[in-house]
Image: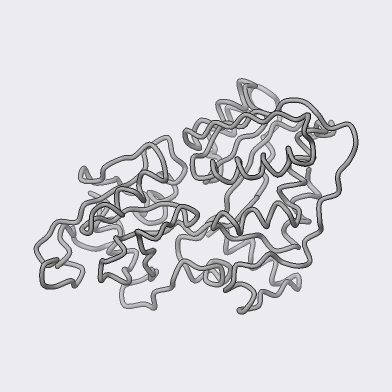
Amino acid sequence: MKILFTLATLVASGVVFTTAAVAQIKVDPAIKPYVSVSGVSGNLNSIGSDTLNNLMTLWAEGFRAIYPNVNIQIEGKGSSTAPVALIEGTAQLGPMSRAMKGSEIDAFEKKYGYKPLEIKVSIDALAVYVHKDSPLKSLSLQQVDSIFSSTNRMGGKPINTWGEVGLVGEFANRPISLFGRNSASGTYGFYKDVALGGGDYGTRVKEQPGSSAVVQGVASDIYAMGYSGIGYKTSGVNAIALASKPGGKAYEPNPENCLSGDYPLARFLYIYVNKDPKKPMDKLTKEFLSFVLSKAGQEVVAKDGYFPMPAALCEEVKAGL
């Protein structure tokens, strides 16, 4: 919902996404290159999202290539650890794969007297994965809910076997082995809110501590299904197409469908920081975030399998640093 609103705003302001460019996951050529400055050194700590762990590492490597006197420590144990780290002052960067909850913002504001600064850094398709040899190509969100939840808030009936989603032969009577994230994960929360209609997970979902563990679990079992960020896709799994409604057209989790809003599990990835609105951001943090939002930073996004943001959005976000 949130990504659609923002993209609609961008389209209204004249931003155009071409099918050819988007399909190849190319960086918007209008994104400005990063320009280095003098006097950047020190330590940065990042605590938060596991989904963003690879991206944060690659960004850190690129940034340190420009500023060798910078040291960046990255810890990715889940999005829910980011607000706590920012409140306690143990990290300057709080990467999250979901937007902060109202309660988390309130806790931060209670201590500092202002809200944390939200910075959009990438677009992600939260993918539903099956084994590379599985014949399943698509599902509706109602079916996804019926498979993963115990509450079936999307209006369907419980689904336990592959036959119940239309597979035949050796698959027909086989139970669907399910992999998901743990409750510390922003991906867990986003999937619960959007794919499960805010309902509860079923007891059959095997909770994993990291995004890659979900994909590895699915890749090792032809009868498995799981959810994880598109940046964790491997040759051992397929990311299936999803339809918003039963009987509706299913859309693949690609850049074009995320930008258009047709893929129902598109989302932004974020970095939150502690910035007093009455004071300038500290130089080290600002330069790191400027690098992330530059051409080089968004090339890292494409390299890691996520979807770069349009130039207009990068400039909009940079203006708020």
Which residue extends farthest right? 38
Q: Position of residue 157 (x, y in %)?
A: 19, 61
Q: Is residue 210 above or below residue 293?
A: above
Looking at the image, which residue is at 24% across and 57% down?
147
Q: Position of residue 249 (x, y in %)?
A: 39, 78
Q: How is the image coloured?
A: one colour
Looking at the image, which residue is at 50% across and 45% down?
51
User: In the picture provided, is 226 more to the left or to the right than 60?
Assistant: left
User: In the picture provided, is 1 more to the left or to the right than 287?
Assistant: left
Residues 62 and 320: in front is: 62
Q: Position of residue 195 (x, y in %)?
A: 37, 56
Q: Quadrant of residue 210?
A: top left
Residues 175 and 89: in front is: 175
Looking at the image, which residue is at 28% across and 56% down?
225
Residues 199 and 290: in front is: 290
Count the marks.
Answer: 0
Q: Is residue 157 above or below residue 20?
A: above
Q: Position of residue 191 (x, y in %)?
A: 40, 51
Looking at the image, which residue is at 39% across and 74% down?
250
Q: Is residue 296 above or below residue 263?
A: above
Q: Quadrant of residue 107?
A: top right
User: In the picture provided, is 224 more to the left or to the right than 99?
Assistant: left
Q: Is residue 266 above or below residue 319?
A: below
User: In the picture provided, is 71 more to the left or to the right than 265?
Assistant: right
Quadrant occupied by the C terminus: top right
